[in-house]
Image: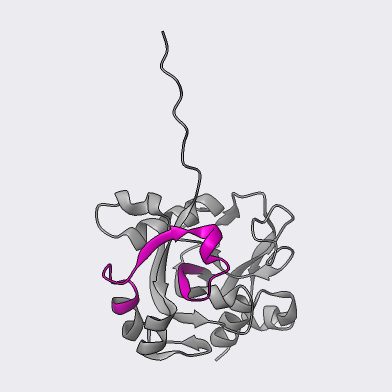
């Protein structure tokens, strides 16, 4: 006799930090290169929690922490357009230079860093990264002027690749390739806000 199948909790829980804490450390709009000032505090398990994504997507009292990864090779930046299968309708059809996503409660099995495990998982889910690289966290993004931005905080990593070998894995990633930042900035308005902020940073 087979055992009955137990229901699986399908509610996604994502890592958040209180927006008030972010404001106490030092609220900013746009980009800051002072990552060290924020990360030790905002990622401190004493302050973070895992909450249902459906709730925090509309609750600006929390910031969802998002690794946002930019792939660069010989000065050229990987870019793409978010297709019709993109999960968040607010970003659908927008162009982007960032790969990344939420830190999930499922990432807690990581031996060392839950944050690093989430970043690795998100990259592996979205693209085939087939080049050796050197990676650096270069700053944070905050955008309180948009509906999406008010509930998210981006942590920007640049991956300097040995070869331009990045291919889409997700069907929602279309029209991808590498281009100079100066070329991409000419179509700045086509990009999601975080990508606009990153392109402004890369052009400095």
Please state if 17 lies on the left or on the right of 77 as rendered.
Answer: left
Residue 144, percent from left and from top: 57, 83
Residue 112, percent from left and from top: 25, 57
> Residue at the location (59% across, 87% down)?
200
Is 47 a magenta residue?
A: yes
Between 175 and 105, the residue placed more toward the observer is 105
94 above or below 146?
above
How many tags in the picture? 0
160 above or below 9?
below
Residue 42, percent from left and from top: 34, 76
Residue 156, percent from left and from top: 46, 75
> Residue at the location (36% across, 88% down)?
24
Is 62 a magenta residue?
A: yes
- For the C terminus, give its image quadrant: bottom right
Q: Quadrant of residue 179?
A: bottom right
Q: Quadrant of residue 25?
A: bottom left
- Whether residue 81 is visible here, answered yes or no, is yes
- Whether residue 119 is visible here, answered yes or no, is no
- For the N terminus, give its image quadrant: top left
- The magenta segment is 41-69
State the scheme by which the image is colored.
one colour
> Residue at the location (44% across, 28% down)?
6
Please state if 85 lies on the left or on the right of 152 as rendered.
Answer: right
Q: Quadrant of residue 23?
A: bottom left
């Amino acid at each position: 006799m087979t055992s009955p199948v137990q229901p699986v909790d399908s509610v996604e829980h994502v890592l958040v930090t209180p927006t008030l804490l972010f404001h106490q450390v030092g609220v900013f709009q746009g980009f800051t290169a002072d990552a060290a000032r924020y990360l030790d505090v905002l990622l401190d398990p004493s302050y973070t929690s895992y909450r249902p994504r459906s709730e925090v997507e509309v609750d600006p009292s929390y910031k969802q922490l998002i690794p946002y990864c930019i792939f660069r090779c010989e000065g050229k930046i990987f870019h793409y357009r978010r297709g019709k299968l993109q999960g968040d309708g607010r970003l659908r059809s927008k162009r982007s230079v960032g790969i990344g996503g939420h830190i999930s409660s499922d990432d807690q099995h990581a031996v060392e860093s839950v944050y690093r495990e989430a970043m690795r998982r998100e990259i592996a889910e979205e693209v085939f990264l087939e080049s050796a690289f050197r990676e650096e966290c270069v700053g944070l993004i905050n955008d309180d002027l948009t509906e999406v931005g008010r509930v998210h905080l981006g942590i920007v990593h640049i991956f300097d690749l040995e070869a331009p070998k990045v291919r889409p894995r997700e069907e929602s990633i279309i029209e991808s390739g590498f281009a100079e930042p100066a070329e991409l900035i000419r179509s700045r308005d086509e990009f999601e806000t975080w990508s606009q902020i990153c392109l402004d940073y890369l052009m400095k």
